Image (tube, helix red, strand yellow):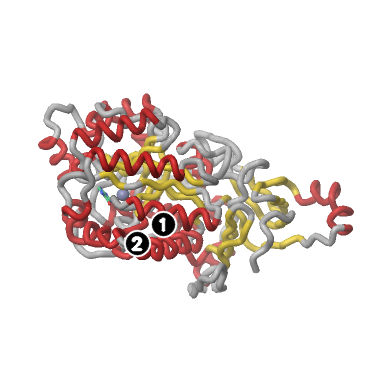
Amino acid sequence: MEKAGNALQIHRGKMLHFAKTTLNPSEHYSYIEDAILVTSNGIIEYFGEANDYLQQNQQYIDSEHISIEQHSGLIIPGLIDSHVHYPQVEIIASFGKQLLDWLNTYTFPAEQQFVNAAYARGQAEFFMNQLFAHGTTTASVYATVHPQSVNSFFDVAEAYNARMICGKVLMDRNCPEALRDTPESGYRDSKKLIERWHKQGRQLYAITPRFAPTSSEQQLAKAGQLANEHPDTYIQTHLSENPSEVQWINELFPEHSDYLAVYEAHDLVRDKALFGHGIHLTDREYIALSESGAAISFCPSSNLFLGSGLFNYQRAQANGVPIALASDVGGGTSLSMFANQADAYKVCQMQQTSLSPFESLYLCTQGAAHTMGIDHQVGNLNIGTEADFIELDLAATPMLAQRIQRSTNLSEQLFAINMLGDDRVIAKTYVAGQQVYQKGIELCGHSFTNG
Ligand code: GUN
Ligand code: ZN
């Protein structure tokens, strides 16, 4: 099943992507009914009309006996999840709490287990395979406070040659003793991890203060120092998710005008900073975010599940704040970026905005990649980018098959996939040209049974 990574591989079928950054994804998409995608050494060597390619290369293909893999489904770029917690996969779907109680009741106990590197390694493997089974090939991932949780994660990501962003959580107060670092140890451990992993192969590091309530001013200052010393690393944290959290910020940081100001005061608001949620923002915060180059991760299933509120997509967009979609598992209820597109649609509907299916797909492909500064590498099918792509099964369920059959155009089809899709629509997942997942089949020593 697995093929040699370096050999030329030719894929043929229906293909859809967004080649460029756009404010209007519903107009600026590229769909080819009979396309060819050629990969070699993990890179896309050709993407375009099958006829054009075959006219020029048929003789060579025949003489070299290269087989062309015909796909019956729809090929799109690998999906991007801009905010997810790998240590929380085991507490996904935990009942009845809002953010702060949910953290204390479920999240902090689960994260304490990651002091054990072998445990972390097992969970990292499970998580990575679940990402692939859900069609996600790049994610910005929170580990725990333990450096070994990051090493375990990157070890697994490296073994699959997957483009991943991850960071050690910084947390020195308002959490269990076992999950605390200090401003100095958090700085030192993060720096070591940056030196070991950032831009090592496809791995990227994110400086990760959990959120302002669990970091002292001294720790936020050390995080900002690190961010200045390593300007090409990511920063990821949470911002204005829940009303009680915002109230708590006002009590903890009375000298700052608002939540974002706490991060601004410590040099944590810049290009490549990804802020999870951003639901309860003031006008000033929207403007400051848009001027800074930072982005918001829109986490619809988490926001609904934890009762946090409705992200104002239209307002964030009107203010020019870059937005990428995210699952925020374990606050979110699915790793599927399709399930999260469905929830994003409903969150917008509640605010009289109808998010187009092209736009929501853009938010977890090219749009997310652009927001994260990696669209020259992933998020599209452009020649020269890394060969991360997935095949969707448009007949994954009888309901979807019937709905697709009734659809009269691509927009309707895509909308049906977005609303009804989850891991069942992922037929195959490729990372750097290598197949890492096939529905119902064991690959790389892992068994998948959701076929
Ligand atoms: N705020 C601080 N930590 C977390 C977390 O783990 N999940 C979510 N959803 N919000 C947070
Ligand atoms: Zn989160």
Q: Which mark is first along the chain, 1 or 2? A: 2
- Whether 288 is drawn above or below 446: the answer is above
Residue at horizontal 64%, vertical 47%? 31
Q: Secondary structure at mark 1?
A: helix
Location of the N terminus by quadrant is: bottom right
In the image, 7: left or right of 317? Answer: right
Tell me, yes or no, if residue 159 can be seen here. Answer: yes
**Residue 89, numbered label:** 2
Instruction: Write the residue at 70% across / 57% down.
Output: 11
Which of the pair 382/409 is nearer the observer? 382
Number of other residues with Cα within 10 Å of mark 1, as a class: few under 14, some 14 to 19, many 20 or more:
many
Q: Where residue 78 sits in the image (x, y, percent)?
A: 54, 52
Instruction: Tell me the amino acid under the disc marked 2.
Output: Val
Nearer-the-camera pick, 262 or 226: 226
Label 2, secondary structure: give it.
helix
Task: Tell whether circle 1 marks a residue whose Cβ is less than 8 angstroms from ligand 1.
Answer: no
> Left of 375 or right of it: where is 342?
left
Snapshot quadrant of residue 86: bottom left
Mark 2 packing: few (<14 Cα in 10 Å), some, or many (20+)? Answer: many
Res. 279 in view: no
How many angstroms separate mark 2 from mark 1 (CA)? 15 Å
Residue under numbered circle 1: 152
Q: Residue at x 20, y 33 (%)?
A: 218
Which amino acid is tagged 1?
Ser
Residue at image point 42% right, 55% down:
153
Observer-side mark, 2 or 1, equals 1
**Vertical arrangement, residue 292 with respect to residue 42, above or below:** above
Q: Is mark 2 within 8 Å of ligand 1?
A: no
Residue 246: x and y, percent? 18, 40
Locate residue 121, reporting x and y percent.
40, 62
Q: Is residue 6 left or right of residue 311?
A: right
